[in-house]
Amino acid sequence: MSLRSVVIDCPDPPALASFYAQLLDGRLHATDPQWCEVHFDGLKFKLSFQQVGSYQPPEWPDGSPQQSHLDFTVSDLRAASLRAVALGASVLGQQVEEPGCSFIVHADPSGHPFCLCEET
Protein backbone atom coordinates (compact mmCIF):
# COMPACT_ATOMS: atom_id res chain seq x y z
CA MET A 1 0.00 0.00 0.00
CA SER A 2 1.20 3.52 -0.75
CA LEU A 3 -0.16 7.02 -0.40
CA ARG A 4 -1.75 8.17 -3.66
CA SER A 5 -2.74 11.74 -2.79
CA VAL A 6 -3.83 14.23 -0.20
CA VAL A 7 -7.18 15.78 -1.15
CA ILE A 8 -7.90 19.33 -0.04
CA ASP A 9 -11.42 20.78 0.03
CA CYS A 10 -11.76 24.31 -1.33
CA PRO A 11 -14.15 26.65 -3.13
CA ASP A 12 -11.97 27.11 -6.27
CA PRO A 13 -9.84 24.05 -7.18
CA PRO A 14 -8.09 25.58 -10.23
CA ALA A 15 -6.94 28.62 -8.24
CA LEU A 16 -5.76 26.68 -5.20
CA ALA A 17 -4.06 23.98 -7.30
CA SER A 18 -2.28 26.72 -9.24
CA PHE A 19 -1.05 28.25 -5.96
CA TYR A 20 0.45 24.94 -4.79
CA ALA A 21 1.86 24.08 -8.23
CA GLN A 22 3.77 27.37 -8.21
CA LEU A 23 4.76 27.14 -4.54
CA LEU A 24 6.09 23.57 -4.88
CA ASP A 25 7.26 23.63 -8.52
CA GLY A 26 4.72 20.96 -9.45
CA ARG A 27 2.79 20.31 -12.65
CA LEU A 28 -0.79 21.56 -12.67
CA HIS A 29 -3.59 19.36 -14.05
CA ALA A 30 -6.68 21.57 -14.11
CA THR A 31 -9.02 20.30 -16.82
CA ASP A 32 -12.01 19.92 -14.48
CA PRO A 33 -13.04 23.01 -12.46
CA GLN A 34 -14.33 20.76 -9.66
CA TRP A 35 -11.22 18.54 -9.33
CA CYS A 36 -7.61 19.56 -9.97
CA GLU A 37 -4.26 17.93 -9.22
CA VAL A 38 -0.63 18.87 -8.77
CA HIS A 39 1.90 16.22 -9.81
CA PHE A 40 5.58 16.11 -8.92
CA ASP A 41 8.43 14.73 -11.02
CA GLY A 42 9.71 11.43 -9.69
CA LEU A 43 6.86 10.97 -7.19
CA LYS A 44 3.70 8.90 -7.44
CA PHE A 45 2.16 11.11 -4.75
CA LYS A 46 0.02 14.11 -5.76
CA LEU A 47 -1.99 16.89 -4.17
CA SER A 48 -5.63 16.95 -5.24
CA PHE A 49 -8.19 19.73 -4.82
CA GLN A 50 -11.95 19.20 -4.82
CA GLN A 51 -14.67 21.81 -4.95
CA VAL A 52 -16.91 22.10 -1.91
CA GLY A 53 -19.66 24.67 -2.27
CA SER A 54 -20.19 25.06 1.46
CA TYR A 55 -16.47 25.30 2.26
CA GLN A 56 -15.64 27.34 5.37
CA PRO A 57 -11.94 27.96 6.07
CA PRO A 58 -10.50 27.17 9.49
CA GLU A 59 -9.86 30.12 11.78
CA TRP A 60 -6.38 29.49 13.09
CA PRO A 61 -5.39 29.40 15.90
CA ASP A 62 -8.76 30.04 17.57
CA GLY A 63 -12.20 29.50 16.09
CA SER A 64 -13.19 26.90 13.50
CA PRO A 65 -10.55 24.17 13.84
CA GLN A 66 -8.31 22.86 11.12
CA GLN A 67 -8.66 19.17 10.42
CA SER A 68 -5.19 18.78 8.97
CA HIS A 69 -2.35 20.86 7.60
CA LEU A 70 0.71 20.46 5.40
CA ASP A 71 4.32 20.99 6.52
CA PHE A 72 6.99 21.80 3.93
CA THR A 73 10.75 21.69 4.53
CA VAL A 74 12.57 24.68 3.05
CA SER A 75 16.23 25.67 2.93
CA ASP A 76 15.64 29.42 3.51
CA LEU A 77 12.63 30.14 5.73
CA ARG A 78 12.49 33.88 5.13
CA ALA A 79 12.75 33.57 1.33
CA ALA A 80 10.17 30.77 1.22
CA SER A 81 7.76 32.80 3.34
CA LEU A 82 8.13 35.85 1.10
CA ARG A 83 7.56 33.69 -1.99
CA ALA A 84 4.45 32.08 -0.48
CA VAL A 85 3.02 35.50 0.35
CA ALA A 86 3.79 36.77 -3.16
CA LEU A 87 1.80 33.81 -4.52
CA GLY A 88 -1.23 34.64 -2.36
CA ALA A 89 -0.59 33.10 1.06
CA SER A 90 -0.91 35.02 4.30
CA VAL A 91 1.26 34.75 7.41
CA LEU A 92 -0.69 33.55 10.47
CA GLY A 93 1.95 33.88 13.14
CA GLN A 94 5.48 34.78 14.13
CA GLN A 95 8.44 32.52 13.46
CA VAL A 96 8.58 29.72 16.03
CA GLU A 97 11.84 28.18 17.22
CA GLU A 98 11.84 24.53 18.29
CA PRO A 99 14.76 22.18 18.87
CA GLY A 100 16.04 21.34 15.39
CA CYS A 101 13.49 23.43 13.50
CA SER A 102 12.16 26.93 12.89
CA PHE A 103 8.76 27.39 11.26
CA ILE A 104 6.19 29.96 10.22
CA VAL A 105 2.48 29.17 9.93
CA HIS A 106 0.78 30.49 6.78
CA ALA A 107 -2.66 30.18 5.21
CA ASP A 108 -3.11 29.34 1.54
CA PRO A 109 -5.51 31.47 -0.55
CA SER A 110 -8.46 29.32 0.63
CA GLY A 111 -7.49 29.67 4.29
CA HIS A 112 -5.88 26.24 4.92
CA PRO A 113 -2.99 26.53 7.37
CA PHE A 114 0.42 25.19 6.29
CA CYS A 115 3.87 25.44 7.82
CA LEU A 116 7.15 26.32 6.18
CA CYS A 117 9.88 24.62 8.23
CA GLU A 118 13.65 25.10 8.17
CA GLU A 119 15.79 22.53 9.94
CA THR A 120 18.39 24.08 12.24
Image (spheres, grey):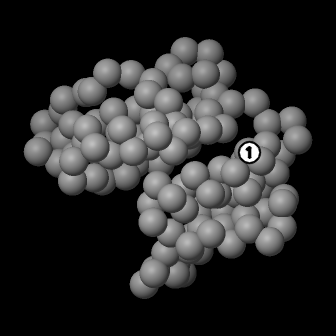
Residue 55, image quadrant: top right
Query: In the orientation shown, which residue stands out farthest toward the top?
Result: 62
Q: Which sits in the foreground, 2 or 103?
A: 103
24 up-or-down from 26: above or below: above
- Secondary structure beneath label 1: strand
The structure residue drawn at horizontal position 65% and vertical position 50%, both measured from the top left corner, is 16
Residue 37, image quadrant: bottom right
Query: In the orientation shown, which residue stands out farthest toward the bottom?
Result: 42
Residue 39, image quadrant: bottom right
Relative image position of residue 116 (x, y in whole percent): 35, 43
Q: Is residue 98 left or right of residue 49?
A: left
35 up-or-down from 96: above or below: below
The answer to whether one can see residue 94 in this image is yes
Q: Is the C terminus in the top left, top right, bottom left or bottom right quadrant?
A: top left
57 up-or-down from 69: above or below: above
Q: Is the N terminus in the top left, top right, bottom left or bottom right quadrant?
A: bottom right
Q: Which sits in the foreground, 13 or 44?
A: 13
The structure residue drawn at horizontal position 17% and vertical position 48%, both measured from the top left corner, is 119
The answer to whether one can see residue 116 in this image is no
The structure residue drawn at horizontal position 51% and vertical position 44%, both measured from the top left corner, is 87
Relative image position of residue 3 (x, y in whole percent): 54, 72
The structure residue drawn at horizontal position 49% and vertical position 75%, both measured from the top left corner, is 40
User: How many numbered discs?
Assistant: 1
Relative image position of residue 104 (x, y in whole percent): 33, 33
Classify 10 Å Cα crowding around label 1: few (below 14), some (14-19), many (20 and above). many
Query: In the orientation shown, which residue stands out farthest toward the front?
Result: 86
Q: Which residue is mark 1?
A: 10
What's the amino acid at mark 1?
Cys
Query: In the orientation shown, which residue stands out farthest toward the right?
Result: 53
Relative image position of residue 67 (x, y in whole percent): 60, 38
54 up-or-down from 45: above or below: above
